[in-house]
Image (spheres, rainbow, N blue to C red):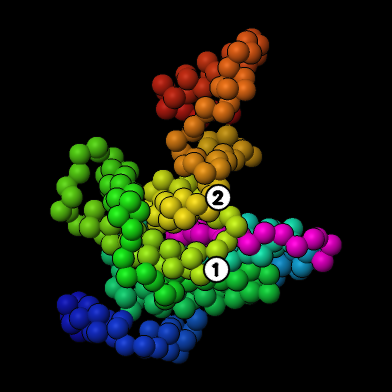
Amino acid sequence: MTLLKKATIKQVLGEIPLTAEIYWQLRQQGRPLSKSASLRKLEKHLPAWCAQAQAAARRQPPGKRVMIFSTLRYWIEHAALLGVAMAGLGHQVSLAYLPYTNWRKPLNRFDLRRQNAYMRSALRKAAQLVRPVSLLDAPSTNGLPETLEAEIREVALRDTQYTLQVEEVDLTGELYRLRLARNFKAARAALAWMRKHRPEVVITPNGSILEMGAVYQTARHLGIPVVTYEFGEQRGRIWLARDAEVMRQETGALWAARGGTPLTEEQAERVRALFASRQDASLWE
């Protein structure tokens, strides 16, 4: 069978209900699309994590309604661990996700639904603590408010700049159109879900790019508090921001609180080391 015929068949099957899910169950025998899309490590550790979190949750007062969103295998693994931990602290956690395996390459709907079935099955192991929510098949709004649509277009532009490492990008190019379509899909689904379930806080990695950026903008549009987070080169450190994109490293509040305090010599040396590492493109601490 030629690649063109195979792609055409997948395109048709991808629009027929249950075809991809049945194929995944019977022919793939519950496996992911590829090794790079596997949640094997997560599946291995989830039972132990959940047992510990369930024991802890029984001692906690009721917490907040929390929505955690992520996409791509490595972020979904981390979000699942974060969700289980927060459930152990007494919070009601919904883990929303999209099953994309690569932000740069299109994926036909048949394969996307197969990967979605796999991720749903893997995350179901934590269902007693965390509610998995696939935004791929969640109800969506028909459109977006004008201001939110403009923000989503900015996210798609940033995605393209980030991926190509250039400032000037072709807004008619395939990459920009792919990023725009996926971000619109994420925003429409997230908007409908948040309006219905009204989480008290949304947590997402990064918040500036990809579908994480789209969900961040959607939550801010609805006035829902958002926490974004990322990891830098320092081991054992995490960056956190509330109602801000953590990668922008906004320091207004820090300057207001500490701007008039002189640095010690040790602190000044750490700043010099940081700038030197940036200039030399080397790791810092």
In the displayed structure, does residue 252 sit left or right of residue 33? Answer: right
Is 8 or 128 nearer to us in this picture?
A: 128
In the displayed structure, does residue 112 sit left or right of residue 50? Answer: left
Q: Is residue 152 above or below residue 192?
A: above
Is 75 or 255 nearer to us in this picture?
A: 255
Q: Which residue is mark 2?
A: 225
The residue stretch that appears in magenta: 58-79
In the displayed structure, does residue 65 sit left or right of residue 175? Answer: right
Q: What residue sits 24% from the left and 53% below the top?
A: 176
Is 260 or 266 nearer to us in this picture?
A: 260
State which quarter of the image contains the C terminus. top right
- Disc 1 secondary structure class: helix
State which quarter of the image contains the N terminus. bottom left
Task: Decide: few, some or many residues near mark 2? Use Cα within 10 Å; few <14, some 14-19, many ≥20.
Answer: some
Q: Is residue 101 above or below residue 264?
A: below
Q: What residue sits 55% from the left and 18% below the top?
A: 271
Callout 1 amino acid: His
Q: Residue 60 in magenta?
A: yes
Callout 2 amino acid: Pro
Please provide percent x and percent y for residue 69: 51, 59
Separation of disc 1 and disc 2 at Cα? 14 Å
Determine which of the numbered discs, if any, sits on residue 197 in the image: 1
Please provide percent x and percent y for residue 36: 44, 63
Q: What residue sits 45% from the left and 60% below the top?
A: 71
Instruction: Tell me the quarter of the picture where residue 101 sits.
Output: bottom left
Please provide percent x and percent y for residue 184: 32, 61
Q: Is residue 209 above or below residue 282?
A: below
